[in-house]
Image (cartoon, helix red, strand yellow):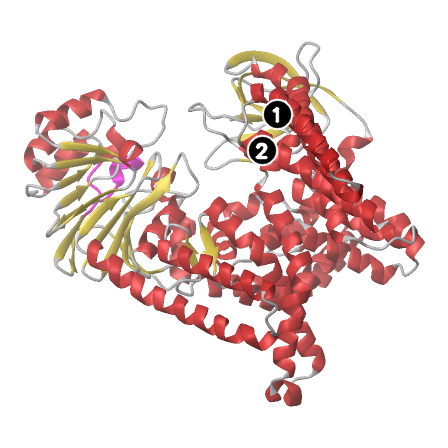
Amino acid sequence: MVEIMRKLAIASFSFAISIFVSRYFLPYDWLLLCIGIAAACSLLGLLYTGNKRLRILIALLAVAVGFLWSFAYTSIFVKPYWVYHEEILTVTATVTDYPVARQPRGYRVDAAIRIDRNPSIRVRLYYSNETELKPGDIIKLTGVFRRTDITDEGDRFDALSSRGLFLSASISGNIDVVGFESGIRHLPKRIAESITRKIDEIFPDDISPFLQALLMGKRDELYRDTALNASLSASGIIHIVSISGMHIAFLMGFLSLVIRNRRLFSFYGIPLLFFFMAMTGFTPAVTRAGIMQIFLICAPLFRRERDSITSLSFALFCLLAVNPYSIASVGLHLSFSATLGIILFTSRINSAISDMLRGSKLFRKKVPRYIINFITSNLATTMGALILTLPLTAVHFGYVSLISPITNLLTISAVSFAFPAGLLVTLIGFISTSVGSILAYPVTLAARYIIFIAKEFATVPYSIVYSTNAHIMFWLAYVYIIYTALPLLKARARQYIYPTCISLILLFALMLISPVATTAASNNSITVLDVGQGMSVVVTSDEFTMVIDCGSSSTSRAGEITHEFIMNLGRTTIDLLAITHFHADHINGVEFLLSRINVSALAIPDPDGAFLADDIIELARKRGTVIMYITEIINVDFGETQIYIYPPLGVYGEENERGISILTVGEVTALITGDMNSATERALLRFTTLPKIDVLVVGHHGSRHSTSEELLYATMPDIAIIPVGRNSFGHPAQEVLDRLGRVGATIYRTDEYGHVTVSGR
């Protein structure tokens, strides 16, 4: 039986490897050639005998089958729809989920369509007019359809295709509901929506988005709370709001307390698992965990040993057999690697830590055994999962949370209580809302505790480090080499102490040395960051740091990009954060910054009527940030640089024109005007006398309505930096480029040059 399981694991992993290679590295047209090569190579197995021959044959034939299935799946289900890329079509679709509001405006919903005689395909629909839709609605629409596995520039984009959504459509006009498809397949989503609404009803408003994500994996409301989402990410516990193996284990563990009989447990547990997976959308991470749990449930019934590697590999095989494109899912990568790390390393780490603690007189005499067991088991599980997920986190998200072992240890008990208790309380809420609201109190306390830990630890300096910091990445590589070599050398538990101490000393040394090296090169400079179609400007002068705006309409990472840049300079405080005006492409990363790094002061114009300002002001007050409302000229002594902040001078009611402008005078003299138009620029020239400047951060991303000749000839900039990304507005306008050329300014665009830095002497 053991040999059969090993062969199943070999076949599954070989199948997965070929799918991975075909999705990431091979063009579609090469797959048939690879099928033949893999099948031919399987003949090498004939050179061996016994189990070795069989394993080679199984592995290579599984590789061939993987290439074949990747080719067949694309040919049958996906390629027929590629011809509709950039086509305007009128189609009938069946809604498969509930609509979700998008930021800053509009909605999206998933649906299934069938065009001509092609197989049904899932699509994501984007629309602007609010329409009441629910799973099962049959709708008629007209839209521009696009492939989701590529962008317009030809780059890969797997976030949707990995979930089985192979087309997207931007809908023009209204969506007409023309019918309804009844049936059980839409029932899980309807129940999930009902549970989500009940969570919103019985739990406090500030906790509801977190619990919706924790219990049901619905993170749309949580994403709107930028500060909390950023804190969960920085503290290394963002995974608790992504339904995965941990949640499945909690659910089954709670059920096992209620049902002791193994046969009854499997009778109720397996259907419950499938239904829960359906409610959460059969995401790759949930499906992987569910299949593995079914293996664990069924093994005792058939009197077979539990083999975690086999169940993990078979779960991966099932996922890729249903949708080979799911190999690109970030959630699957992290879930699979975390589980594999736990299987391979947790028991060894647990033994090593237990041996060290038992050898300590303090722990042996004063700490109860159950506390030692709790600490060692949870710490070992966390570290086992992190061993393989840390490199993937660095690759996918560009950072590594150094504090995650501590935060996971501090929150694991609260999460293990909040998840099953939250589900139970919500179900009681359907019987009696008032009783559910009363019973929700302990769950609310647990959720508040988790959020408190996330927010407090997220602000610890260097709680995360970015993969662009080469020193830290070299340190991480060193740690991996050392801790890979020690088990191979059969080191004893105590022999891990010295490498651990050395690695910690090196880490602290790098944190101290790295800022000294980078700060010296970054003093007295202005940097316009590449945040896409938006703006974020960092000004440094001696030990002072200023940020002007932080937002983008083409990426949700403006805050992360700015925070990463500042941290890599070795700076842990923003002395002044200035917001020119309250449009999303200038401020939707500000909450992220406020939650991640200490901000001493915030300078803003009058926020009257700007609904996006409320959350920023509230968060700044909670963080103890001094808020300055700019109603007159403010002069800030900023080291060797003087900062002049001018009040709004434009037409009241027009957000672009009610913005502030900023002049820095020092080794680098620069002017930042936000999105003000030419008329407001002329008002600024009447209001004050501007000097000749070194750098002009071109207004309104290069719009033809800004950067007037009057402003240019008054300031005569040597360098013009245009903060711009992919957009449909024609930015930067040719008229602006011509005007800049006439005054002799050297032009730099962030969409072409990336971050642009101008430094003093």
Report crowding for label 2: few under 14, some 14 to 19, many 20 or more residues within 10 A (C-alpha): some
Q: Is residue 215 visible?
A: yes
SS of the residue at dot 1? helix
Residue at 37 percent across and 64 percent down: it is 624
| 90 on left or right of 472 | right
SS of the residue at dot 2? helix
Tell me where residue 695 appears, x and y as whole percent.
Answer: 15, 41
Between marks 1 and 2, how big is the CA–CA gap? 10 Å
Question: As drawn, which residue projects farthest toward the front?
Answer: 47
Q: Amino acid at mark 2?
A: Val
Determine which residue is flagged by label 1: 34
| 348 on left or right of 616 | right
Marks 1,2: beta carbons within 8 A: yes
Residue at 22 percent across and 26 percent down: it is 705
Mark number displayed over residue 21: 2
- Residue range in magenta is 646-660
